[in-house]
């Protein structure tokens, strides 16, 4: 597996959840970090903790990536830092019937989940390809594999990220480029996601929710092995395999029943 000591990673959405886990895992492997998210206080706390534990350098950039040109601004901030790894982790979901959701709020979510992630990948892959070395991890979701009522738009954004990641990986591979691209597709995990999305935990979610740190470790290990998709936990992989054989309408109905809020 690749030696990451002295290399540098940019992690978006690093203030909590998978982002904070990725920061810890990569710092443990010797990488210097640039971490970004909206909550500067949490980023500064994470920076202090990681620098003390691992002795690596951590730069904090407090930024909201939902802005129209936010991805370009972030790239301009770090383009001279010789980034070796991009972790496109910033994103969130919105839970409700689509007809009840606000169009402007949905647009902001799509901007973050899709446009900013795609733009950052486009900007950084040019640099990584030029030096024929590097890694890109895009955080997708189990929802990428299935029509997901209540998360109709969120699931569609994650399907974009998964398919985009595998297509980009294939292009790079066929062009002989030593740049690894992986889509990370976890199921429900004990992060801030469910609460931020406005969902109450259904019985299904309560019984199937997983831990974030082991899933994040699996994602990084899969990225370093250039796996196209990493889906932690056997139950998630089995469910995704089984769903291939269901008509999409039935798969959507199964998702509706499993994640509907508790009464």
Image (spheres, rainbow, N blue to C red):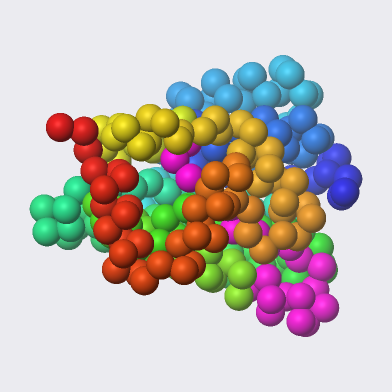
- Residue located at (44% from left, 40% from top): 188
- Say if 141 sits above or below 173 in the image: above
- Find the residue positioned furthest to the bottom: 175
Indicate the quadrant where residue 23 lies.
Answer: top right
Left/right of residue 4 with respect to residue 256 in the rendered view: right
Q: Nearer the viewer, residue 219 or 53?
A: 219
Q: Which residues are magenta?
A: 168-189
Can residue 22 be seen here? The reply is: no
- Find the residue positioned furthest to the left: 100
- Residue located at (74% from left, 19% from top): 53
Q: Quadrant of the C terminus?
A: top left
User: Residue 39: image x %, image y %?
Assistant: 42, 32
Can residue 212 be seen here? The reply is: yes
- Please check the rendered image and state whether residue 176 is part of the magenta-colored stretch, yes or no: yes
Left/right of residue 244 with respect to residue 100 in the rendered view: right
- Residue located at (48% from left, 25% from top): 42
Q: How many labels sit on residues?
A: 0
Left/right of residue 178 with respect to residue 215 in the rendered view: right
- Please check the rendered image and state whether residue 94 is part of the magenta-colored stretch, yes or no: no
- Residue located at (29% from left, 68% from top): 249
Indicate the quadrant where residue 79 lies.
Answer: bottom right
Q: Nearer the viewer, residue 148 or 20?
A: 148
- Say if 165 sits above or below 29 in the image: below
Q: Nearer the viewer, residue 9 or 249?
A: 249
- Say if 257 sits above or below 98 in the image: above
User: Residue 255: image x %, image y %?
Assistant: 32, 53
User: Residue 80: image x %, image y %?
Assistant: 69, 55
Q: Nearer the viewer, residue 189 or 236?
A: 236
Left/right of residue 219 with respect to residue 256 in the rendered view: right
User: Residue 104: image x %, image y %?
Assistant: 19, 57
């Amino acid at each position: 597996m690749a030696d990451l000591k002295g290399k540098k990673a940019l992690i978006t959405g690093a203030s909590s959840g998978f982002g904070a886990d990725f920061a810890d895992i990569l710092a443990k492997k010797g990488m210097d970090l640039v971490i970004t998210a909206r909550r500067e206080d949490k980023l500064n706390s994470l920076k202090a903790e990681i620098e003390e534990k691992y002795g690596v350098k951590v730069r904090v950039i407090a930024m909201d990536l939902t802005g129209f040109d936010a991805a370009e601004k972030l790239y301009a901030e770090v383009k001279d830092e010789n980034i070796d790894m991009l972790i496109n982790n910033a994103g969130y979901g919105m839970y409700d019937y689509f007809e009840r959701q606000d169009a402007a709020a949905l647009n902001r979510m799509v901007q973050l989940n899709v446009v900013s992630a795609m733009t950052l990948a486009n900007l950084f892959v040019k640099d990584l390809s030029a030096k024929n070395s590097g890694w890109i991890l895009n955080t997708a979701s189990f929802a990428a594999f299935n029509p997901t009522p209540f998360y109709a738009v969120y699931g569609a954004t994650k399907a974009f990220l998964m398919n985009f990641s595998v297509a980009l990986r294939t292009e790079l591979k066929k062009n002989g480029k030593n740049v690894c691209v992986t889509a990370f597709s976890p199921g429900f995990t004990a992060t801030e996601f469910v609460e931020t999305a406005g969902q109450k935990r259904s019985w299904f979610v309560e019984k199937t929710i997983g831990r974030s740190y082991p899933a994040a470790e699996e994602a990084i290990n899969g990225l370093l092995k250039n796996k196209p998709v990493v889906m932690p936990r056997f139950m998630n992989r089995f469910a995704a395999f089984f769903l291939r054989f269901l008509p999409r309408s039935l798969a959507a109905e199964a998702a509706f029943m499993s994640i509907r809020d508790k009464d």
